[in-house]
Amino acid sequence: MLDIYVDADACPVKQEIFRVAKRYDLKVILVSNSWMRTPESSWLELIVVDKGPDVVDDWIVEHAGTDDIVISGDIPLASRCLKKGAMVLGNTGRPFDEDNIGDVLSIRDLLSDLREQGMMTRGPKPFAKKDRSRFLQALDEMIVKTRRRNGQR
């Protein structure tokens, strides 16, 4: 079964996820450390977990599985979900997969090490309109690909 799990605390594309999920009649599970206002709908569920490092990530990894889609910009979470067979899409529309996750993790770790040594590194680019558009297209493609693989329309 195809469900969409969202690392919701800092997700800038929740409205886009809702729109696509509604069109395909998919369940969306928002996972967060705090309550947030969400539309009331049978296809949408908000899970509020305890505060703490990686509590949201751990919940998502425990529940997401093969043919589910995880939406997150968290690279270690993406890696863990891929190992469980889930598909992962970054907030800017970049799919994470077995071919690119190793490189992405390495770059993340390198930049983290440089920052710890006091070197100035640039942060992520500001979220742009083109990121939103790329995200919508990538999410739609992921859903269609999964449904075709499972013999659904």
Image (spheres, helix red, strand yellow):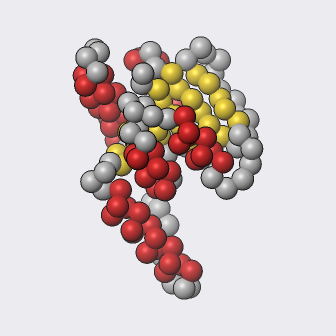
Q: Where is residue 130 in the image (x, y as percent from the top left)?
A: 36, 45
* Image height of 111 relative to 56, above or below: below
- Residue at the image point whose x is 42% and y is 24% from the top: 2
- Residue at the image point whose x is 53% and y is 42% from the top: 61
* Image height of 138 relative to 143, above or below: below
Quadrant placement of the C terminus: top left
Question: For residue 35, what is the image quadrant?
Answer: top right
Horizontal side of 38 relative to 108 (left or right) equals right
Q: How many marks?
A: 0
In this rendered view, identify the residue nearer to me: 124 or 116: 116
- Residue at the image point whose x is 63% and y is 45% from the top: 56
Q: Position of residue 15 (x, y in %)?
A: 52, 31
Horizontal side of 95 relative to 65 (left or right) equals left
Question: For residue 11, what is the image quadrant?
Answer: top right
Quadrant placement of the N terminus: top left
Q: Where is residue 48 in the image (x, y as percent from the top left)?
A: 70, 36
* Image height of 40 relative to 127, above or below: above
Residue 116 at least partly seen: yes
In this rendered view, identify the residue nearer to me: 35 or 49: 49
Q: Where is residue 26 in the image (x, y as percent from the top left)?
A: 46, 20
Horizontal side of 35 relative to 148 (left or right) equals right
* Image height of 56 relative to 44, above or below: below
Residue 135 at least partly seen: no
- Residue at the image point whose x is 56% and y is 80% from the top: 116
